[in-house]
Image (tube, rainbow, N blue to C red):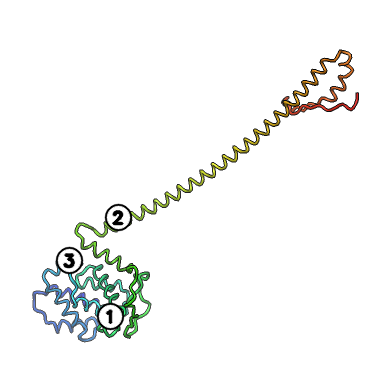
Amino acid sequence: MSLKLALFEMKEVLEKHKNKNLDEDIFISELEKKHGLRENTLVFYYNNLMFLTIKPSSDLLSEAKKVNRKWSKNEIDFMFQYIKERQEESVNNITELLKEVAALLNRGYQSVNYKYYSLVKENEGQQANNLNGYHFTTITEKEIPVISTEALPESNPVFPNNSNQQPQNMNLLDILSGLITNVEQIPGIQLHELLGSLYQLTNMALQNRDAAQQLNKIKAENQREKEALKEQLKQKEQQLMLEKKRNDELQQEIAKLAKEISAFNQLGDAAKIQNLKSYNQRLNYLIDGSGVVLKVGTDKATGS
C-alpha cells in the first residue's frame, strides 16, 4: 500500500491527459487496486490534482511563483490530509512528507514548510474538534529532521492552551523559514549566495577569534620573557654590587698594606732585618691560580 506512488502516478497521468477525456471512475478504481488502497481513497486527491492541472501555466511555474502563489483552502486541506494518511502508513519523517507535498502541489519546499508550521502554531491552544479532524504532528526544532520510532496512535490530539502566552522571541524555525521565504521573493538575491556569504562571515569571525587568541598567547609569552629578562638583569645588578663591595674592601686592604710597607721602609736596616720575619708572619696574601689577588690582610703579631 503506497499513497505516495499512487498520487505521483495520478499527477503524471493528469498532466499528460489534461486536454483529453479521461474516465475518472475507472482510472481511480484501477489506481486504488494497483496500489492496494481502500475504495474512494483517491477521490479527494483526484479532484484537487485535477484543479491544479487545469490552472493556466501551472506546469511552467518558476521557483519564485511557487513561493508567491497564494495558498488556497483546497491546498491546505490536501497537505494535511496527505500527511495524516501517510502517517497512517507509518511514514513519520515530517521533512520527507513536506517535500512530497511540495512536489505534488508544484510549490517550493520552503513555502510548504513555512505554511505547515505556521498553521500548526496558529492552531495551538485550540481544541481538536476545531481542526476539522486533521492530526497535527509537531516536533521541536532541536529534533529536525527526525524519524519517529513508532506509529502515531489513532486518537484525537489535545493541544495545550497557550493562547495567552506570547513568547518574547520568535521561534527559531519561524525565523529561518521566514528568512528563506522572504529572500526567495526578493528579485536579484540568490538564497544560496546569501547563505554562502553568511557562512563566509562566520568563518571569518572564527578566524578572527583564533587570531586574537594567538595574539594574546604571543603577548603572554613576550610578557613572560620580559619578566625573565628583568629577573636576570636584577641578578646581574646584585652580582655587580657584590663585586663592587669586594673591590672596595680590597682597596681598603691594599691601603692598609701600603701603610705597613711605608712604615717598614722607614725603619733602619738593622730594624728591618730584626722585624722582617715578624712582618712576614703578619702579612697574608690570598691569590688565585692566575695570580689575581683575592684578599690581602694583616694580622697583629703575637710576638717576635
Dot label at residue 240: none
Secondary element type, mark 3: helix
Q: Percent position (x, y) of residue 147?
A: 35, 74
Of marks 3 and 2, which one's residue comes earlier in the chain?
A: 3
Please tell me which residue lies in front, 294 or 53.
294
Taking the spot 28% from the left edge, 76% from the top edge, the residue there is: 122
Q: Amino acid at mark 3?
A: Lys
**Tag 3 and tag 2, C-beta contact below 8 Å:** no
Nearest to the eye among marks 1 and 3: give it.
3
Local crowd size for mark 1, using a 10 Å CA cut-off: few (<14), some (14–19), many (≥20)? many
> SS of the residue at dot 2?
helix
Q: Reading the chain from its start, which is encountered first: label 1 or label 2?
A: 1
Marks 3/2: CA distance? Answer: 25 Å
- Return the residue nearer the eye: 234 or 294: 234
* Residue where numbered disc 3 is placed: 65
The amino acid marked with disc number 1 is: Lys
| Label 2 neighbour load within 10 Å: few <14, some 14-19, many 20+ | few
Q: How many marks?
A: 3
**For residue 227, what is the image quadrant?**
top right
